Image (tube, helix red, strand yellow):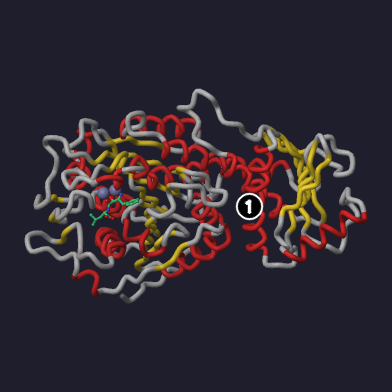
């Protein structure tokens, strides 16, 4: 989707036009007859967020209603959703271009609409002999948006696009080695340092979690470290972004039954998300020092696979009893978190992981199940930003009683608790490795990959969480240095 800025007069524009109509007071620019305006007002009062289409053969006018006086956040989400409707309508009409104008519309509203269009227009096409249709060209009236603003947003959307491509790729075509190589190549073009640890190095570092999970695989593991450290960084110690990179999760010897294995190519969405956030920050030169730590392997029941009852010694020396080989994400993340804490002393550590089915059962596919330790202030900011960009987080408790559930008889801790509170015990397992570092855990199992289209998130990989974390980093300065310890 190519977006250009050019003047659009809704009255004589030769093409499809979207008119963002937030305020009834002025309808002078609407290219409609009196009767049509009356009709529009009836539709508006029935549903102030409707999309009303006027046939102007060979083109169409889409009036996108919203209420400019409503809270900005509501409007922006409604506009993303309306954009999704308009994209579907255009495709049904076999149209591939549109101009966007409005009345009294502010740039944030136009950006939200474009964002909805971009996200909605995505499909995973690389294995299709016949490419599905896409919106080719969108022209936006420059009254509503500056070139610089457009380009900053386009760079972010490009990262979301790539995250979705990686997550949608099957493991046969994207394994730990090739994913690491791809990240290395992108980092080379940006002000980002990339270090890739191969199996030998991972062995030398004694990352027992990552090596344990990798034992049943024919592919080598990788551990990727990305670092973005601009001269004008507002933080002296980095923010660490840790992402689960299970390239495919069969469950290992505790193999996933029936359909439960479907879609497990998406089990590296955490790593893809965190790499994309760091790249987006570098693309747009945000003044924050970031480091991303991305452990990568697939989880397979190959002949030397790790087994339940094995005891693994993690990077920080903690011993872990394996109770279930399908709880593999926390094992590779534990090494990454411990590595971040020891080598970077981050002022804040955030992880993103498709970690538990329990998180999906708890809150469904409408947000991220989140937990935190010693990170009240940044967590508060993250929650606000989540509501703002509509990638929301719901906090689960992190009471000390849950720690009891992962104590082991044979090792320091074990990799599963009981059948209850599974999302929380998984988080608690990870928090053990964060020690006193302010820590936020994001379980994205419910939102990283949609089995069917959900509003402007198309079927498959969503890129959910990138806009959340990017907007958090943009506003991070506000809470800097104000972390207060939580008592659990
Ligand atoms: N990758 C899965 C979690 C998952 C489930 C992600 C559904 C997306 C959708 C994870 O590795 C896993 O298998 N977790 C187990 C943990 C259990 C064995 C304690 C689960 O949630 O069932
Ligand atoms: Zn698993
Ligand atoms: Zn997994």
Q: Is mark 1 within 8 Å of ligand 1?
A: no
Is the N terminus in the top left, top right, bottom left or bottom right quadrant?
Answer: top right
Residue receiving disc 1: 80
Mark 1, secondary structure of its residue: helix
Whole-percent x, y for residue 137 in the image: 70, 34
Residue placed farthest to the bottom in the image? 487
> Left or right: 315 with respect to 279?
left
Determine crowd level at label 1: few under 14, some 14-19, many 20+ residues with C-alpha closer than 10 A. Answer: many
In the image shown, does 468 or 132 lie closer to the viewer?
Answer: 132
In the image shown, does 469 or 338 lie closer to the viewer?
Answer: 469
Q: Residue at x 36, y 61 (%)?
A: 361
Whole-percent x, y for residue 226 in the image: 40, 41
In the image shown, does 394 or 486 lie closer to the viewer?
Answer: 394
The answer to whether residue 220 is above or below residue 393 is above
Q: Residue at x 84, y 35 (%)?
A: 14
**Residue 37 in view (yes/no):** yes
Residue placed farthest to the top in the image? 129
Q: Residue at x 67, y 63 (%)?
A: 72
Whole-percent x, y for residue 263 in the image: 36, 43
Residue placed farthest to the left in the image? 410
Total residue callouts? 1
> Left or right: 176 with respect to 312?
right
**Residue 349 in view (yes/no):** no
Whole-percent x, y for residue 182 in the image: 41, 31
Q: Residue at x 28, y 67 (%)?
A: 421
> Left or right: 52 with respect to 280?
right
Is the C terminus in the top left, top right, bottom left or bottom right quadrant?
Answer: bottom left
> Residue 103 sits in which quadrant?
bottom right
């Amino acid at each position: 989707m190519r977006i250009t800025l050019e003047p659009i007069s809704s009255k004589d524009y030769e093409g499809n036009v979207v008119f963002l109509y937030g305020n009834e007071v002025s309808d002078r620019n609407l290219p409609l007859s009196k009767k049509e305006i009356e009709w529009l007002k009836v539709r508006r009062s029935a549903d102030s967020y409707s999309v009303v289409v006027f046939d102007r053969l060979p083109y169409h006018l889409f009036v996108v209603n919203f209420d400019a006086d409503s809270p900005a956040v509501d409007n922006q989400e409604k506009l993303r959703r309306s954009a999704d409707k308009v994209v579907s309508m255009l495709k049904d009409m076999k149209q591939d271009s549109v101009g966007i104008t409005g009345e009294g519309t502010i740039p944030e509203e136009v950006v939200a609409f474009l964002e909805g269009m971009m996200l909605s227009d995505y499909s995973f096409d690389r294995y299709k002999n016949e490419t599905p249709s896409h919106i080719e060209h969108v022209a936006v009236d420059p009254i509503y948006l500056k070139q610089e603003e457009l380009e900053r947003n386009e760079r972010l959307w490009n990262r979301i696009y790539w995250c979705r491509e990686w997550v949608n790729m099957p493991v046969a075509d994207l394994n730990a080695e090739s994913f690491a190589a791809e990240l290395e190549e992108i980092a080379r073009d940006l002000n980002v340092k990339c270090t890739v640890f191969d199996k030998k190095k991972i062995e030398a570092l004694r990352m027992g979690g990552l090596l344990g999970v990798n034992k049943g695989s024919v592919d080598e593991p990788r551990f990727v470290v990305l670092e973005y450290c601009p001269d004008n960084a507002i933080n002296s110690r980095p923010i660490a972004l840790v992402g689960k990179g299970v390239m495919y999760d069969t469950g290992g010897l505790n193999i996933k039954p029936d359909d439960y294995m479907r879609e497990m190519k998406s089990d590296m969405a955490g790593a893809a998300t965190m790499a994309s956030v760091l790249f987006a920050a570098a693309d747009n030169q945000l003044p924050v020092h970031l480091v991303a730590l991305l452990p990568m392997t697939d989880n397979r029941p190959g002949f030397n696979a790790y087994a339940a009852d094995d005891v693994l010694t993690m990077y920080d020396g903690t011993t872990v009893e394996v109770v279930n080989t399908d709880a593999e994400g926390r094992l590779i993340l534990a090494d990454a978190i411990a590595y971040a804490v020891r080598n970077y002393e981050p002022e804040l550590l955030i992880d993103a992981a498709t970690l538990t089915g329990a998180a999906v059962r708890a809150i469904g596919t409408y947000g991220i199940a989140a937990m935190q330790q010693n990170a009240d202030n940044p967590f508060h900011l993250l929650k606000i930003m989540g509501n703002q960009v509509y990638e929301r987080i719901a906090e689960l408790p992190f009471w000390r009683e849950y720690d009891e559930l992962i104590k082991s008889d044979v090792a320091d801790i074990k990799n599963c608790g009981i059948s209850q509170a599974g999302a929380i015990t998984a988080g608690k397992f990870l928090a053990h490795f964060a020690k006193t570092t302010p820590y936020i855990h994001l379980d994205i199992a419910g939102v990283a990959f949609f089995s069917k289209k959900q509003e402007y998130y198309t079927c498959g990989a969503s890129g959910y969480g990138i806009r959340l974390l990017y907007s958090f980093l943009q506003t991070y300065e506000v809470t800097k240095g104000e972390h207060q310890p939580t008592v659990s």
